[in-house]
Image (tube, rainbow, N blue to C red):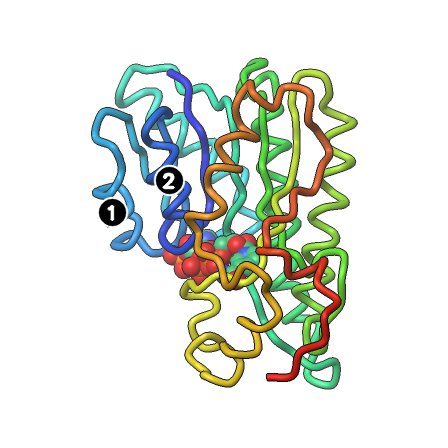
Amino acid sequence: MKYTLITGASSGLGRETAIYLSESRNLILNARNIERLEETKSLCKSTSDIILWPYDLSLINDLELNFVEFIKNIRLERSIEIEFEAFVHCAGVMKMLPLRSLSLNSLNEVYAVNVFVPCMIVKILASKKFNGKNLNSVVFISSNISDRGAAAFCAYGSSKSALDGLMRNLAVELAPSVRVNSILPGGMRTAMTADIFDDINIASEFNKNYPLGIGTPADIVPAVEFLLSEKSRWITGQQIVIDGGRTINITERKA
Ligand SMILES: NC(=O)c1ccc[n+]([C@@H]2O[C@H](COP(=O)([O-])OP(=O)(O)OC[C@H]3O[C@@H](n4cnc5c(N)ncnc54)[C@H](OP(=O)(O)O)[C@@H]3O)[C@@H](O)[C@H]2O)c1
């Protein structure tokens, strides 16, 4: 059976992606919080097969072993073939850290989940021994900060630039069998940004700078589905910005 792996599926955009894709795909969902993963599963279409893989992705040294063992056990327990046709990396760590507060540990924490993990997971899924030639599309959830800059965003912003660099290199190396693209969302209200949007002043500043207003995960998921599907069969190595016009707006507006 064919499956799509989604990381970050316990919350926000990853959960919304899981619910949307469950209309047409079997899914393997990853995050740390098992209760919230179960909740995502309960919101998914029941006609699809949904398997939960709870794992802390920051434990990057054990990632390959844990994932491969997990899939091997499911193949044995259920006597089914599990083949990965697609991968959506939605898990992300955002830390707002001014340069003076930046440490090697915090950089490692952000880069592990945002950059190293997607690279290692694609390596596993592109391995013919593990997954045959089944992988055909990968989508990384980046951010519209990837090609820009902002104060206190050295770690997070540069990790998303690195993620997009990784995406382009993988797109060339894995062509023509696997397409790899990223989506660069702008500000959406999720658990990650709740503190920011709860501040009325910041929220009103955001609203003024977004020509189409602040987005929601529902504004992003149709594009994920499109990039995974055959409809985008000639698109690879691209950054798709979905941010309500934030990054093309040069109008100066004071909050
Ligand atoms: N919200 C925005 O405004 C915005 C804008 C641009 C880009 N993005 C990107 O969109 C993606 C989704 O973010 P979101 O807004 O939906 O945030 P969210 O609701 O906080 O979701 C983050 C997800 O990442 C998972 N995660 C974090 N650390 C993990 C770890 N060590 N191991 C496994 N899973 C981990 C979390 O699951 P557990 O806590 O259960 O482990 C959660 O499911 C991120 O890549 C983010 O950078 C968000």
Q: CA distance from mark 1 to mark 2?
A: 12 Å
Residue 121: % across, % down: 58, 37
Residues packed near mark 2 inside 10 Å, few (<14), some (14 to 19) or many (20 plus)? many
Q: Is residue 225 left or right of residue 107?
A: left
Q: Decide if ligand 1 comes within 8 Å of the CB at mark 1.
A: no
- Give the mark nearer the N terminus: 1 vs 2: 2
Residue 28: % across, % down: 38, 34
Which residue is drawn at the image coordinates 36% and 37% (left, top)? 20
Residue 148: % across, % down: 76, 62
Tag in front: 1 or 2: 2
Residue 107: % across, % down: 68, 67
Res 38 label: 1
From what the image shows, is residue 51 above or below residue 107?
above
Which residue is drawn at the image coordinates 73% and 33% (left, top)? 237
- The residue labelled by disc 2 is 18
From what the image shows, is residue 21 above or below residue 55?
above
